[in-house]
Amino acid sequence: MQKKLIALAVAAALASPALALADSANITVYGVADADVELVKSDKVAATAPGSRGRVTSNASRLGVKGEENVGNGLTAFFQVETRVNLMGNEFTTTSNAAGGTTQTNLGVFNGMRNSNIGLKSDFGTAFIGNWDTPFKTSHNKLELFDNTSVATNTALLGAGPAKFNLRQNSSVQYWSPVMSGFQVKGAYSTVNATVENPTAGAATNAANNLGTPNLMSLSAAYDQDGIYVALATEQHKNFTSATAVGSPKESANRLVAAYSLDGMQIGLTVEGMKVTNAAGVDTKKNTYALSGKYAMGANNFGLSYTQANDLSVGGVTTVNSGAKQISLRYGYALTKRSEVYGMYTQLANKAAGTYNFVDVAPLASTAGATLSGFGVGVRHSF
């Protein structure tokens, strides 16, 4: 009897991990490790700022956990939790201290919330709440060559300017329709859990400016089938401008994205219009367009993009020489299906009054009219 009890106990101990594994079989751990060594330059900087620097950047390295479960009645519950990863340990936040100087604090390994949500999906579509890229932002992802990060991404000009539209929006509610014959609609709404975008301005300032709760609405409709991709997207913000702005500003943007793919090649076009309207009814407008192409030949991957931001228009009057243009090139060599070594080069040339800068964790302190350039060599691994 004692031997039988011991045998049963051993069998139970061995079965427990298997049962636990079965319970967690719907859980996936995934991520991207991406870092490069860079040299970045600007031909116009403040007197105390360096004109060039070498650095190592983690780009969009990330780690996530996701899972789903059939809950019956044709419904599937799902979740995702994703964080940015600082591979290099060289990212800091700077704050003022009591001595009148500044204190730097290392941001650590996991230093930024990325796409995270919880929701339900069925044959009628997908609905979730969380912190997630807006449909406006993702409408361009099929053409994006640099994962919306690094010095070379054209989101330095596209979706940027008098307002920011490359957003991963918190407090979001999103619905995605099912894909029907290649066609899909996505919608997002967010009401931010704060009275203003910048609550540190103080209650008196906020009251004087009549700023209410910020909110966002983003919509996209896309067709993606047989090598053809076409997307229309629109996004509107209310009270997203700094709390020091007068009145209740509104921001809006519209975007058309088109691409054609065949035999490892893709060519694409993005056309975008942006408008910020202040309380006095004065519009600041900006138009941007981008051309892109990529080609895969065996283990070799080539990419090229050209982006142009036209001069701003304020109240119908052009702000002369306030635009910029950017050209970026990328070459990658696939070591395996998940690992790649790559090189990239970009040049962002502002006109005399342009103030655009790279989109990354440490932009150069350049001044108006600067031409910035960057070169990087890196490694990327996905799992």
Image (spheres, grey):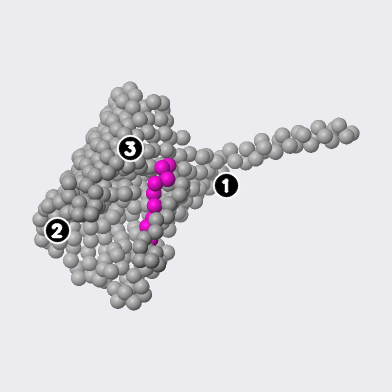
Q: Residue visible at 29% across and 36% down?
A: 376
24 on left or right of 365: right
Neighbor class of circle 2 (other Cα within 10 Å; few <14, some 14-19, many 20+) is: some
Q: Which residue in the protein does label 1 denote? A: 71
- Pick the front one: 176 or 11: 11
| Dot placed on the residue nearer the N-terminal end, 2 or 3 | 3
Instruction: Name the residue type under label 1.
Output: Val
Residue interval drawn in magenta: 86-95
- Residue 152 visible in the picture: no
Identify the residue at the far right of this view.
1
Instruction: Name the residue type under label 2.
Output: Ser
Identify the residue at the far front of this view.
99
- Residue 88 visible in the picture: yes
The percent position of residue 325, horizontal first and vertical second, equals 17, 45
Identify the residue at the far top of this view.
298
176 shown above or below 203? above
- Pick the front one: 277 or 320: 320
Q: Which residue in the protein does label 2 denote? A: 313
169 on left or right of 269: right
353 on left or right of 16: left
- Residue 123, labelled with which disc? none
Q: Residue visible at 53% across and 44% down?
A: 68
The stretch drawn in magenta includes residue 123: no
